[in-house]
Image (cartoon, rainbow, N blue to C red):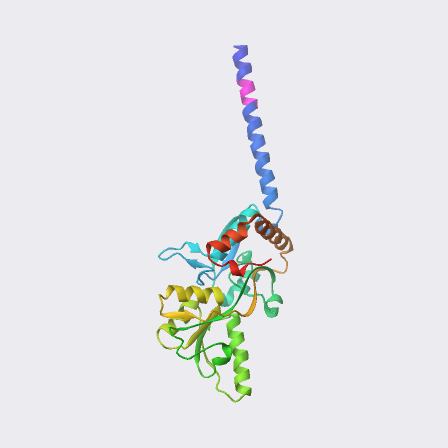
Amino acid sequence: MRFERWFRLVSLLAAVAAVLMLFAACEDDEEEVTGVPELGDGVLQVGADIAYAPMEFFEEGTTTPLGLDIDLGEALAEEMGARGEFINTGWDGIIGALKVERFDVIMSSMTITDERSKEIDFVPYFSAGTDILVSKGNPENIEGIEDLSGLTVAMQVGTIQVEQLNAANEEFKEAGEPEADILIFDLNPLAVEQVRLGRADAVLADSPVVANDARLSEGELEALGLAIESAPYGIGLRKTSTELKAAIEDALQNMIDDGTYDDILDKWGLAGGAIE
C-alpha cells in the first residue's frame, strides 16, 4: 500500500511538473509575441481593400482573400510569431481606419508618397508603376499619359493615378489642349468595366493590376506595358507603432534572406517588383 501511495504521489508530482513546464513555455511564447504591443493577442490585423487583383482579391464565390499582399502579410505575421488576419476596408477611408486603430497595419498596394508619409509610416516591400489599360488594338493610339488629352479615363478613388491625371490636366490646360474627363469609382473592377462598355477610353492603375486585368479579359482589353513613375508599395503603420515597424522590418529582411519573399513573388508572377 505504501508503495502504491508513493507511486501515485510521484505520478501526481510528475503530472504537475509537466503542466507547469507547459505553462512556462506558453508564457515564453506569449512574451515573444507581446514584445510588440499590437501583437499582444497573437494576431496581426491587416487592413486591405480586397478588390485589386492580383495583389489582393477574394476567391470567386467565397470570402477567402488571395493575392500577393495576402501571402506576404500572412508570412510576415508568422515570422513574427503571430497570425495574419485581413480586414476588408474601403480604400478611400483606409488611412483613417488605421489611425483610429481598426487594425494594426495597412497592406493594400499603397504607393508611398510624401503626402501619405505625413500621416503614417511605411515599410517598403514591393515596387510598381502606373500602366494604362485600353480596348483591344488600342483604338486611340495611347502611348502614355500625355496622350489622354480629350479622352475619358476611369480609375479608383484615392489612388496615385488620380493625382497623376490631375497633374496632366493642368499641363493640358496650360498648353491650350482639352483636359481628360476623369471617372472615379470606389473599386478598380468598376473602372475596368467602363472600358468594356465603351464609356471610357482607358483605365489608369498600378502595373501589376493592369497586367492582370488584361490577362483576365481574354483578349478584349490590353495593357500598354508601362511603369510610369515607378515607386515602392509600403506597409502602412501608425506613427506610434515604432516597435511593430521594427519587427516588420526585421521579419521582411529575414524572408528576403531565406528566399520566402522571392518564392511568394514568383508564385504570382511578380518577381519584377522585388525590392532589395
Which quadrant of the figure has residue 194?
A: bottom left
Residue 122 located left or right of residue 85? right
Q: Quadrant of the C terminus?
A: bottom right
Region of the chain picked out in magenta, as a range = 8-13
Q: Measured from the top left, where is residue 184 in percent x and y? A: 45, 74
Q: Residue 129 or 34: which is nearer the viewer?
A: 129
Q: Residue furthest top?
A: 1
Q: Measured from the top left, where is residue 270 in percent x and y? A: 49, 59
Is residue 273 among the parts visible in the rendering? yes
Image vertical order of residue 43 relative to residue 143, above or below: above
Q: Residue furthest bottom?
A: 176
Residue at figure coordinates x 59%, y 68% from the top left: 113
Residue at figure coordinates x 49%, y 54% from the top left: 266
Q: Is residue 200 a member of the stretch shown in magenta?
A: no
Image vertical order of residue 9 relative to residue 199, above or below: above
Q: How many marks?
A: 0
Q: Measured from the top left, where is residue 201 in percent x and y? A: 41, 77
Magenta region's main secondary structure?
Answer: helix
Is residue 43 among the parts visible in the rendering? no
Residue at figure coordinates x 50%, y 68% from the top left: 92
Q: Measured from the top left, where is residue 135 in percent x and y? A: 38, 74
Image vertical order of residue 265 relative to residue 96, above or below: above
Q: Residue 169 or 271: which is nearer the viewer?
A: 271
Q: Residue 179 or 268: which is nearer the viewer?
A: 268
Q: Is residue 12 a member of the stretch shown in magenta?
A: yes
